[in-house]
Image (cartoon, grey):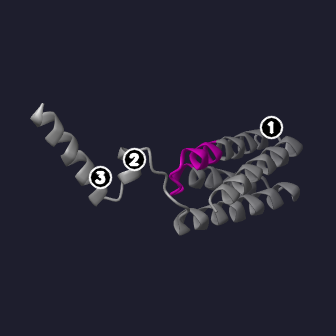
Amino acid sequence: MMRKTLGRFAVVTAAMALGLGSVVTTATARPATPACGSALNTIDDIAAQAQQAISYRDKGNAAVGLTDAAQLSYAAPCFTEELQDLLRGAASRFNDAAGTLYYDNWDDAYASAAAGRGLIWQAQDANH
């Protein structure tokens, strides 16, 4: 019993030293972070450029922008479950948009990109 308690203490202490306290103890949610807000702004900017490329029928730039927005959505340093859910949803929409470009389905690509941006906007609101 003592070994198990000391083991948990060591894990919690190591996690706290690394700044991972909310990962170990889920009772405390992390507050809004500047890094998360910055990442959300960057994702929205890239997605907006991709949407503009879609409207100009520029498949190459649209696909690159949508792929970048999706990858950044997965990697954003936003740690609450709500933000992570919104970001995963946005990444999925951006990937859907990129996939529809393969078939030159411009309207659906634009709509999927807009849906992804809508989820990013919700995440920006939730991050405040």
Q: Position of residue 56 (x, y in %)?
A: 87, 59
Say what amino acid the circle numbered 2 marks. Val
Quadrant containing the N terminus is: top left
Q: Position of residue 54 (x, y in %)?
A: 82, 54
Q: Which residue is mark 3?
A: 15
Quadrant containing the C terminus is: bottom right
Q: Residue at the location (50% across, 57% down)?
A: 77
Q: Nearer the viewer, residue 86 or 12?
A: 12
Q: Nearer the viewer, mark 3 or mark 1?
A: 3
Q: Residue at the location (38% across, 45% down)?
A: 25
Say whether marks 3 and 2 touch (CB < 8 Å): yes
Q: Residue furthest top?
A: 1
Say what amino acid the circle numbered 1 marks. Tyr
Q: Nearer the viewer, residue 99 or 19?
A: 19
Say whether marks 1 and 2 touch (CB < 8 Å): no
**Labels 3 and 1: the sequence-earlier one:** 3
Q: Residues within 10 Å of mark 3 (few under 14, many from 20)?
A: some
Q: Secondary structure at mark 2?
A: helix
Q: Secondary structure at mark 1?
A: loop
Is residue 77 found left or right of 100 in the rendered image? left
Q: Which residue is mark 1?
A: 103
Q: Residue at the location (44% across, 45% down)?
A: 27
Is residue 35 found left or right of 14 in the rendered image? right
Q: Residue at the location (50% across, 52% down)?
A: 79
